[in-house]
Image: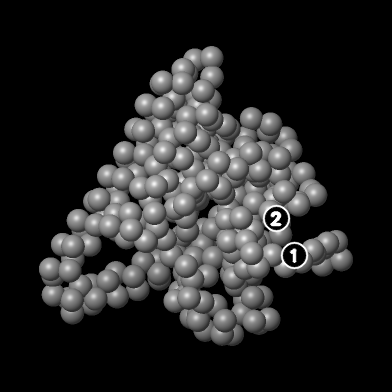
Amino acid sequence: KISEQLNIKYFHKPGLNDREAIFFLIKNCQTKYSAFIADDDFFIPQGLYECASYLEKNKDCRVAYGKAINVDHKSLNKVNNRIYASNYWGKRSFLQNNKIDRLNDFSENYIPNFFGMHRTNEFLQDYDGSQNSPSKSLGELIINYVTLAKGKAEFIPIAYLIRQSHPSRYLVPQGIEDRLIDDKLGESIPVFISTLSKALISEDISIKEAENISKKYLKKILNELIKYSDDKYLFQKINSFFQKAYKRIFNSIKDRLFRKSSYFSDFVYYIKLISEIT
C-alpha cells in the first residue's frame, strides 16, 4: 500500500512567501524525483510513478507529466453530484532535439510544466532563477521556459493531476495593466531575459543570440497579454446579459462533451474517491 510507504515532513516557515517556500521544499527533498502542487490539488499516485519511471529511462527528458483536469470545487466535494470539469493542459509533448525548435513549439502551446515530475537536482536548478522575479506570473514562466531550454518534455497518457477551481484560489492577473501594476511584471523583465539567456548559451548560441531569442519569447508573452486586454475591453462593450448567457451555454456544452471523452474517463474513479472522503 502506498499509504504505508509515505514519509511526510511538515515545515513551519511563516516568513517565506509562496515561491520561497516551494524553493525551500525542493532543497529539502531527499528523493531523486519530485513534483509540486498546491495544497488544494491532487496527484494520482500511479501517474507519479509512471512519470518518474519514464524519466529514469530517458535521460534527455527533463520533465514528464500525464493527463490533468480542472474540476469545480463545489461539484467535487459532494457525493453523486454532477462534476464540472475541463481539460487543464491537453496532451502535448515537446521532444524536439533542437532547443530552439522545442521552445518555439512551447511558446505557441504553453503549459505549466513545473507541475510535472522532475529530477530533484534539475528542478532546483530550473527554479533557482525565478527567485529574483518580483512578478509571480513571470516567475512561473521563467521556470517553465528554462526547463524546456535544458531538456525535453514528455506527456504520458495516464491520469496525473486534478486541480480545483474555487473563488479563493489565487489567479494570476490576466490583463497587461494588472500584470504591470499589481504583479510587478515590468520589474521582472530583466530577470526573465538574463535567466533564460543563461539556459540557452551553448557552443552554437552566443550570449548576444541568447538574449535576442529570450527577448523574442518575452515579446510574444507581452503580445498575448495585450491581445487579452483588448479582447476584454471589447467584451465589456457588449451587452453583459448576452455575454453571460453565451458563456453559460458554451461552458455547459463544453463540459458535457469533455465528461464523455476518454481523457476524462481515467479520472472517474479518483473523483468518486475524493468526493467520498472530503
Q: Give the residue drawn at x 65%, y 68%.
A: 14
Q: Is residue 190 above or below residue 31?
A: above
Q: Which residue is mark 1?
A: 11
Q: x, y (%) of residue 143? A: 53, 44
Q: Quadrant of residue 20?
A: bottom right
Amino acid on which disc 2 is placed: Leu
Q: x, y (%) of residue 24? A: 68, 54
Q: Is residue 210 above or below residue 130?
A: above
Q: Nearer the viewer, residue 136 or 231?
A: 136
Which quadrant: the N terminus? Answer: bottom right
Please say if the residues under marks 1 and 2 sit with CB atoms less than 8 Å apart.
Answer: yes
Disc 1 secondary structure class: loop
Q: Nearer the viewer, residue 163 or 158?
A: 163
For marks 1 and 2, the one nearer the N-term is 1
Which quadrant: the C terminus? Answer: bottom right
Query: Which residue lies most toward the top here?
Result: 203
> Which label number is shown at residue 243?
none
> Which label number is shown at residue 25?
2
